Amino acid sequence: MNGVEKPSDYPSRSTTLLRKLQNTSQSQHVPRNKATVPLSILVIGAGLGGLATAVALARRGHAVTVLEQAAMLGEVGAGIQIPPNSARLLLSWGIGPFFEGRVVEPESMTFRRWENGNAIGYTKLGSNFRETYGAPYFVIHRADFHHALCSLASQVGVKILTNSKVVEYDEHFPSVKTQDGREYAADLVVAADGVKSVARPVVMGGVDKPPIKTGFAAYRAVVNTDEMKADPDTAWLLEKPGINIWIGEDRHVMTYSIAGGKSFNMVLSHVDHTDPSTWNPEDAVKDMREHFETWDPKLRKVIHLVTKTIKWPLLSGARLSTWVSASQKLIIIGDAAHAMVPYMSQGAAMAVEDGAALAEALSIIRTKERVPNALRVFEKERMNRSYGMQSASLVNGKLWHFPDGTEQQARDCGMRAEVEGRSFVESTNQWSDPVTQLWTYGYDAEEELRQAWSSEMGLTNGQSKRI
Ligand SMILES: Cc1cc2nc3c(=O)[nH]c(=O)nc-3n(C[C@H](O)[C@H](O)[C@H](O)COP(=O)(O)OP(=O)(O)OC[C@H]3O[C@@H](n4cnc5c(N)ncnc54)[C@H](O)[C@@H]3O)c2cc1C
Ligand SMILES: *[C@@H]1O[C@H](CO)[C@@H](O)[C@H](O)[C@H]1NC(C)=O
């Protein structure tokens, strides 16, 4: 990529979807097998990752109970992107009806210059992505996404218990204890308890490796679209559903409309090395405006419509040596295992893929004694995928934040082809770069797991001869 070093683990391999598309004319969803060994499974945490995993497991025939610490089910924050690698799985699980009227399908992603909003990069999403990757690229309000997953979970028989904060794990039984003294046992415990995971140190043999501060922070905000429509300087952003991102020195602003077009979502990122405990919520709106004072006047008008915002530190998970406890009966997934900065818009998508891959792994095995094998294959494949995505996300943190100068010019030059309708073989826009695009959106978590299982079994057979 021009202007920026690729990390050594940067994706370069071909993907399953491509293989599939080459084998069959269309990627059709065959209903997947039920598990031969139905297990009782506890999922800790009813975030997007925990719920998606609960759905994936329950529809294979496992008995799934989710324990959530909060008194009420829900999601904080505003919008979230559901890229095709995640949408494909969710739709195949039957989420379609619960998404109706809630999702927006942006036509495109446009990169804009910080000072005037001029287009410097462009990716056509919409029908292009739907045809190439077998699923749409959606954006949605987080609350709507969460609600849809809850509805689907109850449809497939998942039990969700709120007011259930897990304070203790017994990885051997395995069982968990809640703050109010209840105990739950199962065959397998799947902890999807987020960045501050209580399960992670247990899995890591008593020593936690918490996510690392990245020096990035983000304001999250929504704007009422009626106010935006009243001013031609801002109304154009709503004319066609699209993702627009302004990029400049140390900062960027990602925007799109959500709630079926009724509200406008913004994530405003900046470099910030200060301690989050010193951040004063009362200053957030004022500070946010100051960060973008010299930026595109049209963007500033939208920012001025924001009356409420919260600043979030952005973390990236440390690379863990394992996600599976020594007993092989407790595992971590989602942000607990692989938090990432949101610059590929893939954090929750990775958790959805985790759920799909775990359900696939546990449905391949024929006996309960094979569960540890399934978990190992799962872990290896998912570490590769999600830690690769972590790296790709950090790449955007560099690429988007160059000060004006030679690197910025090389970057803009490297992503301008589509704005000018030229063909290209490589792009500094990771939504468009052919290798990155295929790796990101063409990945089929269920199929990849089956492939990983086959090659792993080849190995295991070789070894078992020696036993
Ligand atoms: C600004 C921003 C923008 C983003 N944009 C995108 C995007 O566009 N697309 C995308 O795919 N991802 C995006 N992400 C990432 C995404 O939000 C996360 O990766 C995802 O929400 C993680 O889900 P999770 O279920 O693993 O964890 P969480 O959402 O943190 O859920 C953990 C759950 O566990 C519960 N819990 C915790 N501890 C306990 C306990 N001890 N007992 C019981 N329950 C417990 C919590 O209450 C919570 O409900 C973004 C993130 C940020 C910060
Ligand atoms: C994933 O696997 C590929 C191929 O084996 C390797 O090149 C790459 O470095 C791995 N990525 C990570 C993040 O481990």
Image (cartoon, rainbow, N blue to C red):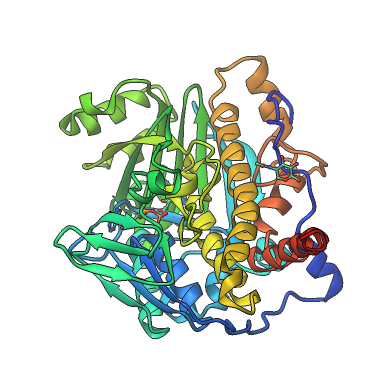
Q: Position of residue 62 (x, y in %)?
A: 47, 80
Residue found at x 40% / y 22%: 294
Q: Position of residue 389 (x, y in %)?
A: 60, 44
Q: Toward the viewer: 261 or 374?
A: 374
Q: Position of residue 24 (x, y in %)?
A: 83, 76
Viewed as shown, does residue 246 lie left or right of 230? right
Q: For ligand 2, which image quadrant applies?
A: top right
Residue most toward the front?
467
Q: In this rendering, is residue 130 above or below 316?
A: below
Question: In which image quadrant can residue 92 be found?
Answer: bottom right
For residue 176, say whether it is visible: yes
Q: In this rendering, is residue 317 above or below 53?
A: above
For residue 84, say whether it is visible: no
Residue found at x 71% / y 65%: 453
Q: In this rendering, is residue 224 above or below 409?
A: below
Residue found at x 26% / y 39%: 310
Q: Position of residue 6 (x, y in %)?
A: 70, 30
Residue most toward the top?
405
Q: Toward the viewer: 467 or 67?
A: 467
Viewed as shown, does residue 226 lie left or right of 386? left
Q: Toward the viewer: 15 or 133?
A: 15
Q: Toward the viewer: 428 or 302?
A: 428
Task: Name the quarter where the C terminus is drawn.
Answer: bottom right
